[in-house]
Image (tube, rainbow, N blue to C red):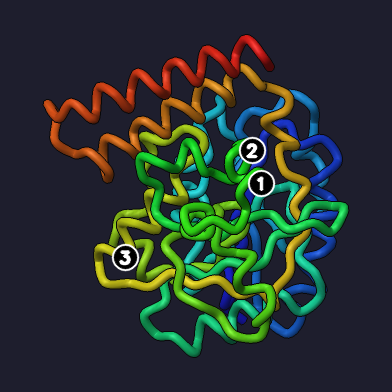
Amino acid sequence: MSSTVAVIIVNFNSGGALTPTMDALEAALAGFPWDGVVIDNASSDGSERPVLSRERFTLLRQPGNTGFAAGVNAGISMTSAPFVLILNPDCRLTANSGQHLFEELQKHPRCALIGPRLLNPDGTLQESARGDPNVLTGLFGRTTLLSRLFPGSPIVRRNLVSSDQVSHPTSSRPVDWISGACMLARREALTEVKGFDEGYFLYWEDADICRRLRGAGWEIRYLASAVVVHDVGRSSMNVRGLANREFHRSAYRYFATHVVPQRWHPGRALGWLILMLRWRLKSLTG
């Protein structure tokens, strides 16, 4: 039987997180024909080895760390299922969450991507559905001081929309973008926009592809009734310096591509300066 869903996991030094992630898929995708691919970006901790004993999964070992976007694209090219579940190695789908995502996606023929409610291991909400990043995102983003001080402000609620949907968990809603930690996608939509932009090594590739899909006439949706536990940062914690640098480099790529695309616009230089200062500050404070 051919697969309906292809699961793509990009792994890099995720420790023991990958095994429970693969275990959880059996219950989450019960009743669906599916198979999986793990793209391993040259892990040095042996975290990819459990894949070898999984009949549903194929392991592709990359000769070096090619980044998340390139890894996802490699997984897409290795599979043929009409639907693609992109999943971080530190995400555990709860029972039937995959079915909920799939059924909701089917209700909306122009929905390209749908994402679940992401929870921290302690049960608190991760803001995984958001508004398009703009010049204020750096001040009112998911982890900033201003967002913590003024959580109900219109600017914060525009940037972080997940909380608004928790009180209506059984119906999805259109959003600007969803976290790439877990997203169910239509292959035809990903093919139309030529997949993920591999210029993003780490971070912001999810915001970019959602924006490009919406520009092509597709829809992005968020479904709070599908729940996934995300132990965020299991890979990036091992390379904090690299993660910090790539976060800010990718933020500037997004800013220059979508927010201030004019090459000589003064806002582009200002954005670069602010991001470089923020990168340096984060480097000093850890």
Q: Amino acid at mark 2?
A: Asp
Report whether residue 37 is seen: no
Residue 141, placed above or below residue 113: above
Q: Marks 2 and 1, Cα distance to the nearest angstrom?
A: 7 Å
Residue placed at 66% from the left, 40% from the top?
A: 11
The residue that label 2 is drawn on is: 40
Relative to the observer, which residue lies in front, 189 or 81? Answer: 189
**Which mark is on residue 59?**
1
Q: Marks 3 and 1, Cα distance to the nearest angstrom?
A: 32 Å
Q: Judge from the rendering whether residue 197 lies leftward or rightward of residue 94; answer left or right.
A: left
Q: Amino acid at mark 1?
A: Leu
Residue placed at 60% from the left, 13% from the top?
A: 283
Residue 111 spot, x, y in % from top left = 42, 76
Q: Secondary structure at mark 3?
A: helix
Residue 206 spot, x, y in % from top left = 47, 50
Residue placed at 64% from the left, 65% from the top?
A: 163
Residue at the extreme bottom: 107
Report whether residue 267 is seen: yes
CB under 8 Å between discs 2 and 1:
yes
Q: Judge from the rendering whether residue 34 lies leftward or rightward of residue 264; answer left or right.
A: right
